Image: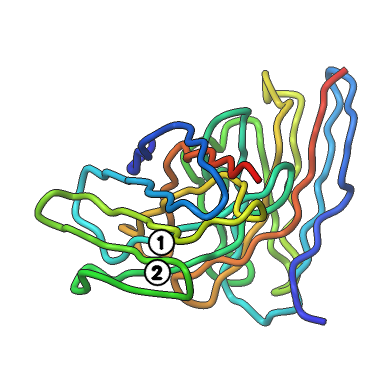
Amino acid sequence: DGGITQSPKYLFRKEGQNVTLSCEQNLNHDAMYWYRQDPGQGLRLIYYSQIVNDFQKGDIAEGYSVSREKKESFPLTVTSAQKNPTAFYLCASSIDSEQFFGPGTRLTVL
Amino acid sequence: SQQGEEDPQALSIQEGENATMNCSYKTSINNLQWYRQNSGRGLVHLILIRSNEREKHSGRLRVTLDTSKKSSSLLITASRAADTASYFCATDKYGNKLVFGAGTILRVKS
C-alpha cells in the first residue's frame, strides 16, 4: 500500500522544547517537502529536498531544521527558536510536478 | 509570498448546482494545479494544466487557464455534499517547487 505517512497525528510541545515530526514515503519519490498551514491560509514551504543528502530552505525556514539521510524519510525538527510553532504541518513528495501529501501533524505549543 | 490568490474565499451552494472557483497569479508559470483538502486532512491532487493548455477536463471537473490574464478557473459540475472541502490552486514556477494560494472554502448543502 503506497503512500506517505506522518507521525504523530497530534503533538503537544512545551515552550523551549525541540520536537521532531516524522515523514516517510514508499513511493520511491526523489523530492520531498515540508509545509506549514495556519488557519484559513494556504500552505507555506518550510524546506524541500530534491535528492538524498541535499535540502534547501523554503520561504519560512527560520526555527526549523531537516535531514535527508534516506530517500524514504524527511524528518522535520521544530526548534525552540521558532517563535510561533502552533500550526498544521504537511509533508509531501513528488516525482514530477504533482505532489502527494501525507495526512498532516497538528502541533500545539502549551 | 503567495503566488496564487483564490476567489471567492468561501462559497456555499445547493447540491446539484455548479461551483466555480477562480485563481489569479502574478508571474509566468510552467503549470497550474488544483488541490482539494478535507477538513484536518492532507491535500489531494485534482488536476494539472500546463501553460500551453487552455482547458482540461477530469470527470466533473473542468479547469481553464488564461495565461494572458494570469488566471485559472475550476468548475465542479453537479456538486455533491462530498465535494465540501477547501480548494487550492498552486503554481509551478521554480521547477517542482509549488506556491499555493489561500484557498476557497466550498460548502455544498444537501
The answer to whether one can see residue B73 in this image is: yes
Q: Quadrant location of residue A69? A: bottom right
Number of numbered markers: 2
Q: In this view, does A92 lie above or below B56?
A: above
- Please report whichever mark, 1 or 2, sits nearer to the chain's N-terminal start: 1
Q: Is mark 2 on a helix, strand or loop?
A: strand
Kindly identify the amino acid type of the residue bearing the numbered disc 2.
Leu
Q: Residue A64 carries which label?
A: none
Mark 1 and mark 2 residues within 8 Å of each other at the beta carbon: yes
Disc 1 and disc 2 on one polypeptide chain: yes
Residue at 23% from the left image edge and 50% from the top image edge: B71
Q: How crowded is mark 1: few (under 14 residues within 10 Å), some or many (20 or more)?
A: many
Q: Distance between the residues labelled 1 and 2?
A: 4 Å
Tell me which residue sits at (61%, 46%) in the image: B85
Residue under the point 43% across and 53% down: B18
Residue A79 point in image, percent of width and height: 75, 31
- Protein chain holding label 1: B
Tell me if I can see residue A43 in this picture.
no
Q: In this view, does A68 lie to the left or right of B50?
A: right
Indicate which disc residue B48 carries: 2
Residue B67: percent from left, percent from top: 15, 58
Q: For this view, does A23 lie left or right of residue B73?
A: right
**Way the structure is coloured:** rainbow
Write down the residue under mark 1.
B33
> Is B77 rendered above or below residue B17?
below
Residue type (three-letter) at the residue carrying disc 1: Gln
Mark 2 surroundings: few (<14), some (14-19) or many (≥20) residues within 10 A: many
Image coords of residue A18 (percent x, y): 83, 32
